Amino acid sequence: MQTQLKEVTLRVFRQDPKREKKHRYQTYKVPYRRGLTVLDSLIYIKENLDPTLSIRYSCRMASCGSCGMMINGLPRLACFTQVTELKTETITVEPLRSFPLIKDLVTSFDDFFKKHHLMLPYLIRRDAEEQENPTHQYLQTDEELERYIQFTYCIRCGLCYAACPVTATDRNFPGPMALAQLYRYYADTRDEGGEERLKVIDNTHGIWRCHFADSCSQVCPKGVDPALAIQLLRRAVMFNNRKR
């Protein structure tokens, strides 16, 4: 798409499940300006053309993960996606797949975060008193930090969950984000809950359910690579089982 064009067309998914049985698409024309993002376009629609449109966003700088949606068929952050990079004058925006619809482009993350919580996403220490009232620092070497730091960059945007073919067919599968966060703590040398964590995902709906399509890592806006975390978890489980 040439940057000198005057406007961009957005084809927006619309549905209020409480009032409508079927969805529809509504088309809007948005004036183009340099640096225009998909989120900028949706905010323009909300403020100038149609106040009934429901969208969710916060930071506008790809840090909070609130504005995840399907953009031309791929899970993306609307604030991070400039209209010029899509190379088309018509952009289709839809709610993230595999998430229950609330209204229009807004989906429910309740189950998403419930699965995250089941992965025990916090440090587990045998000495709970020392953890709550520490008397010293938990020091780590650079090498120990490198084992898990890339997985701390996750912003829980849900793009990997929407891209995963397994979450679309198995509602009990934790999803890429949850599994990657489990590995983040498993690989942390300050954590002492390794055995407990592996038991959570060593089952038919856990890490063995992953088909390794790698679509989760392809859409991650922060380069977290949850597919790698899942493979590392498989290795950890197999090694742990051999020790028994």
Image: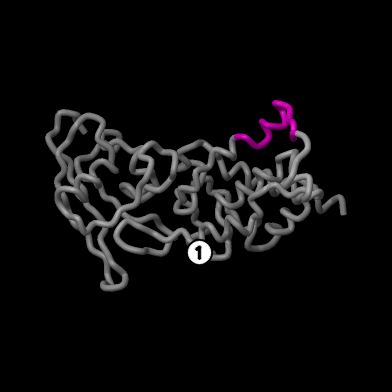
Q: Is residue 101 magenta?
A: no
The location of residue 209, given as percent across then percent down, is 61, 58
Q: Is residue 137 left or right of residue 114?
A: right
Q: Is residue 238 left or right of residue 37?
A: right
Residue 13 vs residue 231, the one in the foreground: 13
The one nearer the camera, 111 or 21, is 111
Residue 29, image x, y percentages: 14, 46
Point out the residue furthest to the right here: 244
First to last magenta residue range: 137-149
Picture residue at 38% right of the left edge, 41% below the top: 59
Rendered residue at 17%/53% (across/down)? 27
Q: How many marks?
A: 1
List x then y, in percent, for residue 210.
59, 54
| Residue occupying image coordinates x 34% and y 52% | 56
Relative to the observer, which residue lies in front, 182 or 75?
182
Q: Which amino acid, by three-letter code, is at mark 1?
A: Thr
**Residue at the disc numbered 1:** 169
